[in-house]
Image (cartoon, grey):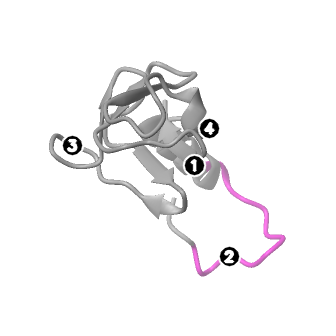
Amino acid sequence: MAWDSTKSPGDLISSDDYNSGVTDQKTRGVPQDENKLGSDCSGTDAGSNRTLTLAEDTIKEDGIMVIKNGTSLHAGTGKDYTVSSSIITFLGPVWDVDNIRVIYFT
């Protein structure tokens, strides 16, 4: 839902405003946010192709962001990770102490 510059803080919203927000949520999905460690991944410390299974399995393909140690990773074959259903496969090494944050829509 785009910012409506004609509204002031405290203004009542109309049913059209509300319905617009509901439509946006249906289109984008419900946001999920998971914080993990590299030790939550399968495989061995510092290994490649380690996998991380997320709590939800209906992830929207274009609605996922993976952040490792504060750096946003790139999805796709030959990049940083791939996603299949609820499983993220990291193509480069993942250390057990790595902080992994996954934000996605279901």
Q: Residue at x 45, y 48 (%)?
A: 66
Distance between mark 1 and mark 4 Cα atoms: 30 Å
The amino acid type of the residue labelled 3 equals: Gly
Q: Nearer the viewer, mark 2 or mark 1?
A: 1
Crowding at label 2, few (<14), some or many (≥20) Cα neighbours within 10 Å? few
Q: Nearer the viewer, mark 2 or mark 4?
A: 4
Which residue sits furthest left?
A: 78
Q: Residue at x 28, y 39 (%)?
A: 91
In the picture provided, is 18 more to the left or to the right than 74? right
Crowding at label 3, few (<14), some or many (≥20) Cα neighbours within 10 Å? few
Residue 7's disc number: 2
Is 77 in front, or is 21? 77
Distance between mark 2 and mark 1 Cα atoms: 15 Å
The amino acid type of the residue labelled 1 equals: Gly
Are dots 3 and 4 in contact, CB under 8 Å? Answer: no
Residue at disc 1, secondary structure: helix
Quadrant for residue 77, please give it.
Answer: top left
The amino acid type of the residue labelled 2 equals: Lys
Residue 36's disc number: 4
Label 3 belongs to which residue?
76
**Going from the N terminus, do you reach mark 3 or mark 1 first?**
1
Label 1 belongs to which residue?
21
